[in-house]
Amino acid sequence: MTGKLVAYIGSYRDAAGDGGGITVLDVSRDGRSLTPVSHVGEPKEAGYLAYVGGTLYAVDERKNDGRGPVEPAASVHAFTVDQGDGSLTWLNARRAPGPRPTFLCADEAGKVLVTANHGDFEHVERVVRTPEGGWDVEYLYDDSTVILYGLEDDGSLGEIRDLHVFSGHGKDPNGSPQAGGHAQASPHAHCAVIDPSGRHVLVCDKGTDQIFVFALGDTLEPEFTYRFEEETGPRHLAFEPGTGRVFVTCEFSSELVSFDFDASSGKLRLLDRVSTVASGHTGGNEPAEVRVHPRGGFVYVNNRGEDSLAWFHTNHNGQLLRLGHVPLARSLHPGVAARSFAFDPSGSFLLLADRPAGLVRSFAVDAEECRLRPLATVAVAEPSFVAFAELP
């Protein structure tokens, strides 16, 4: 590992509508030095990034503002990465039908990229006639989608190959503070992950309490569905290297769940589930990101409410045990909280986007027990996502 290590920090606009874009950090191999070296101002709502094969992909996490939009549409952008300094040159962008594209996963070998589009919480009230001739209202919500894009040889985004629109809803109203208790009034796909075999896409729909598994080819073909009980809210999932196990954060029930995944059938089998917060925690909490340490055996989750980055041990049976946590800045609400973190390629440290603090934080990862120890911080406005890239 003699080349340069850079981290890309996606940011949202601030309350005044300023800022956003992607900041490039030069990162030392020990995680102690974090130096901003360049910045691109678009996309303004860079809530998720993915680096693969010399190209950085970024969402513009928007809802389109009408027939004649004043601002850009919800979309996915591609950037060429300079292999000397990590700077970004815009390649192209594609529309992302379905508001709020919120997750990206690329497969360089298969030349595809998938995105989950969350949709918004607002509804439209339509006046309709009843069968008896009276008047009533119906409530229409945004579509939530998963989209399959092709990738061109130069890394640019190709056309949409397939798109799946989710349907249904969860318990509504429910106990979540989101949207005044209407956070499950419609589907909300929050992640779309290509499995290590490259044959399946797993989508967590927190709005309907389900994980959908699609066969990945030229199209997305439904092949398996795992349904949780009401008010669970599966949000993000991550694979453990080499074991076929999957770990899922459940936003509304504040749980970390482990599954066995059968790459031949696409089926999930429940192994264990535990609370993501310490036993003494009081008040609400909604976990967000989940990451597995590169060598396996330890799983990390950030909590919004407890405002912590917690780590868990997982044994050969997939059983989970919470070991500890480090505190983060106080969240304003689940939407303005520490939301993303990522391990460096060696697994010796991680970076976390602590949005309420306006900081990117680095933490050393203990080589034996994977405990976290603060190393350094750097100021980045409204940081929302972290993605690493190793350059030659």
Image (cartoon, helix red, strand yellow):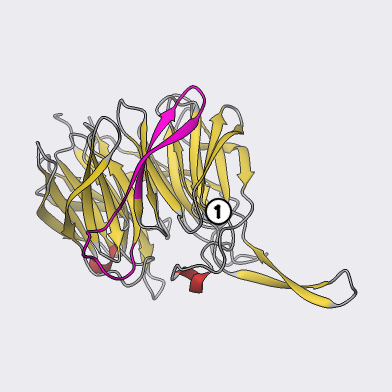
x and y, in percent, of residue 34 in the image: 15, 51
- Asked where in the image residue 52 lies, by quadrant, the reply is top left
Nearest the eye: 133 or 115: 133
Q: Is residue 167 above or below residue 264?
A: below
Q: Please tell me whether mark 1 sits on a helix, a strand or a loop.
A: loop
User: In the rendered structure, does residue 22 fall within the stretch colored magenta?
Assistant: no
Tell me if residue 72 can be seen: yes
x and y, in percent, of residue 141 in the image: 63, 63
- Asked where in the image residue 196 lies, by quadrant, the reply is top left
Relative to 303, 226 lies left or right: right
Tell me if residue 112 can be seen: no
User: In the rendered structure, does residue 257 fall within the stretch colored magenta?
Assistant: yes
Residue behind mark 1: 208
- Asked where in the image residue 22 lies, by quadrant, the reply is bottom left
Q: Which residues are magenta?
A: 256-285
Relative to 315, 72 lies left or right: right
Q: Amino acid at mark 1?
A: Thr
Residue at the image position 25 percent from the left and 47 percent from the top: 300
Nearest the eye: 208 or 381: 208
Image quadrant for the N terminus? top left
Nearest the eye: 385 or 372: 372
Relative to 164, 179 lies left or right: left
x and y, in percent, of residue 352 in the image: 23, 53
Image quadrant for the C terminus? top left
